Amino acid sequence: MLNILKAPNPILTADCAEISINSNDPSKIMVDTPEGMVTLPVFISVMVATMYSRPCCGLAAPQLGVQRKIIVYNPDLENDPDEKDTDRTIIMINPLITNSSEAMEKDIETCLSLPGIEASVKRHTEITVIYLDEDLKAQTMVAKDWEARIIQHEVDHLNGKLFWDRLGPMKQTYMNKYQLAKKRKKRHGK
């Protein structure tokens, strides 16, 4: 498993590059990680293991220090954080949201890269996303509600955005002050 990067790490605010598909065989595609070069399937398995070891339902490659467009998630983890059914694990390589509903909804979001911070974020209630699966097969998915929210959150990571970037300026100011106060408190042992 790899460490989760925390804000303000600059990797979290940079756009990710697509995975170059130079083979039909995923094991011939290499990914440069903080631990060195590994095959795409190995990196995906590390992402999945890391996700299941943390209190989350999704993870994006840049959170592990890899600036490539890969996300993994399991929508069932919202209802049961101890759920370890990897059959519901979705892997998306080079995901692209091609359509979004006009309808939007606010809900509370958290992020492993922003520990201890939560906020109400407005997201589209339905999206269409195209991507490659772990076998490099092209897929199209229409996702709704919670699953649509997870995908949008994780795709934001691939585009150098954290959920607090979607908050208004007043909320961002509050969140920045909150984070600074939390760091000061931690430094002084309180």
Image: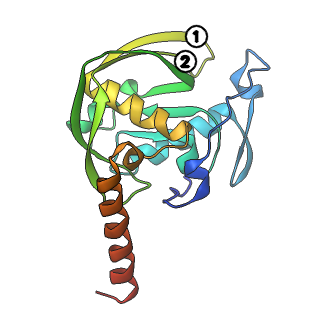
Q: Residue furthest bottom?
A: 188
Location of residue 87 (image quadrant): top left
Residue at label 1?
138
Q: Are marks 1 and 2 in contact (CB under 8 Å)?
A: yes
> Tag 1: residue type?
Ala
> Residue at (20%, 36%) from the top-left corner?
79
Q: Nearer the viewer, residue 10 or 25?
A: 10
Q: Nearer the viewer, residue 150 or 24?
A: 150
> Residue at (55%, 37%) from the top-left corner?
158
* Residue 176 makes an appearance in the image: yes
Task: First in sequence, mark 1 or 2: give its number.
Answer: 2
Q: Secondary structure at mark 1?
A: strand
Q: Nearer the viewer, residue 20 or 117?
A: 117
Location of residue 26 (image quadrant): top right
Residue at label 2?
131
> Tag 2: residue type?
Tyr
Instruction: For label 2, count other residues whose C-alpha is less than 10 Å away and answer few (under 14), some (14-19) or many (20+).
Output: many
Question: Height in image: 14 above or below 142?
Answer: below
